[in-house]
Every structure is written in C-alpha cells, then in structure tokens.
Image (cartoon, rainbow, N blue to C red):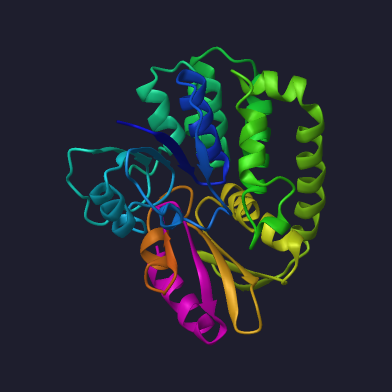
Amino acid sequence: MIEQNIDVFNGDADGLCALVQLRRQSPKESTLVTGVKRDISLLKNIADGKNTQITVLDISFEKNAQDVARLLEQGANISYFDHHKTGDLIKHDNLQTHIDLSADTCTSLIVNEQLQGKYLAWAITAAFGDNLTSKARSLALEAGYKDVEIELLKQLGTLLNYNGYGASLDDFFFAPAELYKKLSLFDTPFEFVEQDLETFKTLSKGYSEDMSKAAAMPLIESDDDIAVIEFPNEKWARRVSGVWANELANRYPDRAHAILTEKDAEHYLVSIRAPLNRKIGADELASQFPTGGGRKAAAGINALAKGQLNEFISAMKIQFKT
C-alpha cells in the first residue's frame, strides 16, 4: 500500500520539464527532492522507502545504485527515467527503468514518448536546454510550431538550464523546487511565459549579464580539437559555466570544450562538452577523475584538484584528438 509519493529530479531544464510533463498528466501530492544540477546522488536524501512510490528523473543510476537497492529492500516502488551512464542495473519487481543512453535524447524526451507527445512543448524546451538543438528544432517543426514559438522554447530551455548551475542554492535566482512549482501550473511553456513573465524576465536579465562576463574570459589552452577556459570563484561564473560551454559547443562544433570554474584554493568545478559534430567522450573523460561523471555529449567533474590541471588537459587532448 502506497502511503507517500516522492519525486526526485535534477534541478536543470531536463529534470524540471520531465517532472512537469508527468505531473500534468498524473497530478499527485508529492515530496520534492532536488538540488543544484551537479548534486546527482539525490536518493541518499530519502531515509526510508517503506510504502513509498519514488519517481526519479534525470540523475545517473550509477551514482544512486546503492540507495536504489536500499530503498527497494525497504519496500519502495521506484520508476526511474534517465539518459546518463547507468553502471550495472538492478533487477527487481518494484523497479521500472526507462533509460536511453543515446547521445541524441534526454529524460524529457523519454517521458514524452511515454506520454505519447501530450506535453511535447515541455519536452522540446528541455531538449533545447540540454543543447540537443537539432533534435529540438526538428521536433518543433514537425509539430508545426512557428519560428517565433521555436525561439521562445529555445530561450526558455536555455534559461531553465542556466538556473540549475551553482555551488549552492544561494547562487540561484530560483531554487529548483520553487521553479518547478511555478512551471507545473501550466500545460505549455507558452502559457508559463505569458502568465509568469516576471520569472521569465528575471532569468533572462541574469543570463544576459552573466554571459557578457563569460565572453570576456580568456582561453588558457586551445588547438583545433579542444579549448579550456578558466572562470573565477564568483556566483555569476558558477551560474553560467554550463550554458557558456553549450554556447561554445554551438559556435565551434568540431571542438571539445571545458570550463574550469575555481571552486576553492585547491579545486576546480569542471563542465565538459564533447564536439557537437561527434557527441561522444565527455563521460569517459570525466570518469577518469574522482567526482566525475555525466553523459556522452556533456559531463562534469565536481572537484578537480588544481594539481591535476595538466593531467586533465592532456587527457582531454587524447580523448578528443581527431
């Protein structure tokens, strides 16, 4: 007998839009478990799975496998939607997995398939946020959206993804749970922008200001295959690191990119993007270092020791050498 529902989701565009789709389709009173985009070991925050339905969206199974096993043993029923590296999956009668590791998909697109396109505009928004630009545009054109509508979905997806980055919730304009509650009131992103324009404008203004600062940051290493940029230990830099990496990937589709944001005196926070024209290898590079992980096209390292910088750059050159 299910006594409570818990929704666990990544705080970026993909996690947000995936949950919006599910709960517009099947409204439920649920406890929300989320956080900064890089905090992906979220299931550790659930103490007891007894008589609990847990829906997990857009966080790596590999990073949560131990807690999945624990919660299942306690009596939880878990539905898991994701597109990140899985490790060894667990087989259990109370575990339903909807996982696709293709480089050209995201969690919201997986949910969209489950719901047969009922909330497609939210899935397209997420795909834009995950920098699946060609896929998102193709789906939007197939659905008959006009250019101005497609541009709005792209802008919103980028802004939702931008809001998910930061070292702590203090870096955010809106905590992910708060932002989800705003988004979940609407069947479409168009309704959200029209009826909650203040939230949209707040994100848009912050994004524009932060991106201007990012554009002024110099390259510390570059060649035909890779580029590495260093950001300072400031709020704007933590917020914009992921979306700036996406921007560079779009500008230079044959080149891999890494944004190194100073985390403290000894460490960097790293955002990695594989070349857009061959979206593989980001997860393999990140996994070579402690606290690294992600997916084929985009990955990160939560704490790269500064003493490992040369090792990281060398590994990046090897990983993405053409």
Compared with 252, 290 (above or below) is below
Query: Would you say 167 lies left or right of 102 here?
Result: right
x and y, in percent, of residue 233 in the image: 72, 71
Q: Nearer the viewer, residue 190 or 97?
A: 97
Q: Nearer the viewer, residue 48 or 10?
A: 48
x and y, in percent, of residue 57 in the image: 43, 41
x and y, in percent, of residue 304 in the image: 52, 76
- View extreme (top): residue: 144
x and y, in percent, of residue 322 in the image: 40, 62
- View extreme (bottom): residue: 307
Q: Which residues are magenta?
A: 294-322
Q: Magenta includes 97?
A: no
Q: Residue at x 67, y 20 (%)?
A: 190
State the image quarter where residue 228 is shown. bottom right
Q: Nearer the viewer, residue 308 or 198?
A: 198
Q: Residue at x 56, y 36 (%)?
A: 128
In the picture, which quadrant includes the N terminus?
Answer: top left
